[in-house]
Structure formats: C-alpha cells, structure tokens
Image: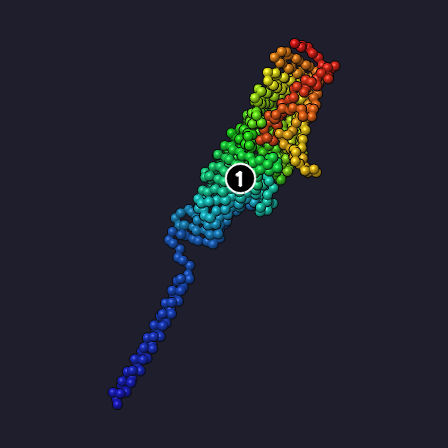
Amino acid sequence: MRNREAARYARWSAIAAGLIAAVVVGVYAERSFQAARARHEAPKAVPTTVQQKSAQFSFSKEEQNRRIFTVRASQATQYKDQDRALLEDVWITVYGRDGSRNDNIHTRECSYEPRTGDVHCAGDVRIDLQNANSGAGTQTGAVGDHLEIETSDLSFNRDTGEASTPAAVEFRFPAGQGRGVGVTYSTNDSTVRVEHSVQFDLNASAQTGGAPATASGSSLEIRRNDRTVVLDGPAIVKSGARELSADKIMVELDTDLHARRVVAEGHPQIHAEEGHGKVAITADHFEALLTPAGWIDRVIADGNIAGTQQTPAGTNHFSAGRVEFSMIPARNLINEMTATGGVTADLHQGGDTHALKTDALRVKFSTPQIAGTPPGQPVKSSMETQRVESAETLAPATIESRTAKDTTILQAKKFVAESAAGGRCLRPIFSRAASCCLWQFAIQSLRARAFRHSQRAEFPSMT
C-alpha cells in the first residue's frame, strides 16, 4: 500500500516538475523572441566612424536680411575624426541678391566640409537656371529665359557662392542645345560661363528663314545681371553656305530676356556662296537690332566696310565707311540700304568695268511674290528674290565705264536709277548669317539714267 502511494506521488511530482519546466522554458522563449524582435526593430548601431546621422539638413547664406541661397539634403551623415559630412539628395537653390532668380542645382550625393564650406558632388549634376517669375516649362524663345545644364564633378563653396566643374557639360535652352567643357557659376553676380570648346545648334524658325544654324566659340558667358550673352572667339556662326566669324559676338537682352541687339566685333567677316559666286565682306563692327518677337528691325555695318563677289565674269567690289539697312517688319527682308563715307562700287562684266564713287548712296529693294503663293496669303519671298527697285546718290558722284574701246566718265550732283521690269540686279554680298545683305550697285542702269540728267551733269573728260 505504501509502495503504491509512493509511486503515485512520484508520478504527480514528475508531472508537476515537467509542467514547471515547460512554463519556465516558455517564459524564457518568449523573452528571447521579444528581445530578438526588439533588436531587429531597433535603429542600427552607429558605426564607430560615424558621429551623427540626421534625417534633414540645410544651411543658407543671407545678406541684409535677404536669403541668397539654401543648401538642402534629405539626409546627412557626420563622420568622426573627419571634418566631413555625407549629404544625400542634395538641392542648392539660388535666389540672388535681389530675389529675382530661382536657380536649382540637384544631385544624389555630395561631400560637405563644414570648416571650409566646400561641397563636392562627384556624380551627375543638373543645373536649372530660370527667373523667379518663370513657371516650369516656360518657353519664350529667349536665350537667357531658361537654361538647363547637365554635368558632373561639381564643387560649390558656401562662403563664396561659386560653383564650378572641369567636366564636360551639355546645355539646353528654348532656341536650341549645345555642349562644352567646364562651367563656372557665380551666385554673386549671376554669371554662367562655359569655359572651353563651346558648340551649339540653333533651331530652325521663321526668323531664321526656316534654316537651322550652328555656332562655336572658345567660351560662352551669360551675364544675367547685365542681360548679355557673349560668345568669345574665334566665334563662328554657320547657316547653310553662309558663315559669320568674329573675335566676339555679343547678344544684349531686354527686360523680358528677349534678344534686342546682336553685335559682332573684332575682325568680323562674312563668307557665303550665292548662286555661281562667292561673297565675302569685312567691317570693324556689325550690329543688328531686333524686335521682341525676334525679327530684325535694323542692321548696321560700320568702319572700313569691304565686300567682294567672285563670279565667272570677274570680281566685283563694294566699300563704304558705314552701311545701314532698314528691314521690312516681321520679314527679315531688306526695305532700304543707305551707305555713307567713301562709297565705291566696281562691276566687272566680261572685259568691261563700271565704277561708282560717291559719299552717300541709297538703294530701295522690292520683294516680289514667289509663284505659288495662294491669293490673300502673306507674300512668300526670300533674299534671293529681292531686286533693286531704285537707287540714288545722296551726294555728288562719278561714274566711270571702261570697255576695250573707250572710257566714259560721268559726274553729277545726283544720279537716280529705277529698275525696269526684269532688269538685272546684282547678287547679295552680305550673309544671311548676319541677317542682312549688301548689294552691288547696278552701274549700267545708273549710266543709262544719267544721260536723262545731262543738264545737271558735268563731263570733264570723255575718251
């Protein structure tokens, strides 16, 4: 009996011990699971090289209670024993000293040195330059209205506000796109400069006669505070068979950042192939004044103007001190040309030569309609279709004609010529690349017309 009760007691004791052990194991297992989950959900331990991590980071530069620029990052990691922080998803927004700009520099990752203020972004960088009042996607056609630059290896300094890179750059603007090597950007004077090997393509438009153009130069500078764009030479602009070259080509912008004045200076030259001839012209200074819509209003060539045209019949010459063209509104076609200052024109036809000399000359041009233009539609025409409608000297003039047999010299206070229907007019010798043209003078028409004014003419010699 006692043995039976002892065995029963032993069994109950064993069961109780097992239950207690199971409870203890369960409690420890639950605590171990909770501890593991807590370790998993807890923030990762900061590496020994990292001092601090922050989810947001920004700093700004202000002058006279106006914010000049702000640098923002979605995350910053500060490293121990290094004066360096790693910035991720970095935005640099530039407002300018007058708050007129909304420029943004964006990249994925940059290294920031708080002591020196240097920010270096080794990866791809995008720079978006526009006015504060320009909405996204604004397309006004101005060179300076909206400029996008893509490059890499950019450095920015917090104290100087200067950004620069020696890497290749690509840029886009409403009128075209281009490329170069190296770029600098100043937040202080809002100047963007492409340092080397600049090339860009200009889109075809009504203002360019439907033809695209290309340009190249040693450097390109956009001075946004002064509203000027400068292409340093050797600067070359090409459109078809026409080419303009100069030491410097400058574009001035109006308050709405539309081009209003274009200047080529420093040995500017124009070369073109027109029909069966080659044309070249040089001057000290070329200038074009434009309307806000981009049409040329007036063109001026100033100082030592010399033009030549090579044809199968010979070489023709034109020279003057100053030539000014007034243009037909919204057409980029010549309405009138006025040349002053030692004007000379030489025409070669076979073995004959004809020369005009005067101090002032005015030529008016006609613009015949190209066949096929529907009635009621705007007249379609081009420089090649323009003809001399009339010409007159505005000062005493001399006409000299030489043939194999004789020489004729005519002098008068004024010569006037009017082109007859189908009358021959000389080819243009100023390139469309500069959006204007010089025309040789129709001396034979002048000579025929001069005899009608013989009562006013003097004939000092006739052989």
Task: Answer left or right for 198 relative to 24.
Answer: right
Q: Quadrant of the N terminus?
A: bottom left
Residue 53: x percent and y percent? Answer: 44, 53
Judged from this view, the residue extending furthest toward the right is 455
Is residue 41 in view?
yes
Task: Answer left or right for 312 relative to 77.
Answer: right
Q: Quadrant of the C terminus?
A: top right
Residue for point 67% across, 35% down:
379
Q: In the figure, residue 251 lies in which quadrant? A: top right
Residue 107: x percent and y percent? Answer: 48, 47
- Identify residue for label 1: 177
Residue for point 66% across, 27% down:
387
Q: For the residue labelled by badge 1, is the local secondary structure a helix, a strand or a loop? A: strand
Q: Nearer the viewer, residue 355 or 414?
A: 355
Residue 287: x percent and y percent? Answer: 61, 29
Q: How many marks?
A: 1
Is residue 394 in view?
no
Q: In the figure, residue 452 lies in which quadrant? A: top right
Q: In the figure, residue 414 lies in which quadrant? A: top right
Q: Nearer the viewer, residue 169 or 158?
A: 169
Relative to residue 212, is residue 79 depicted above or below? below
Relative to residue 187, is residue 450 depicted above or below? above
- Amino acid type for the residue under numbered disc 1: Gln
Residue for point 47% across, 37% down:
181
Residue 151: x percent and y percent? Answer: 48, 42
Residue for point 65% across, 24% down:
424
How crowded pointer 1 is (Cα within 10 Å; few <14, some 14-19, many 20+) is rated as some
Judged from this view, the residue extending furthest toward the front is 372
Relative to residue 271, is residue 80 depicted above or below? below
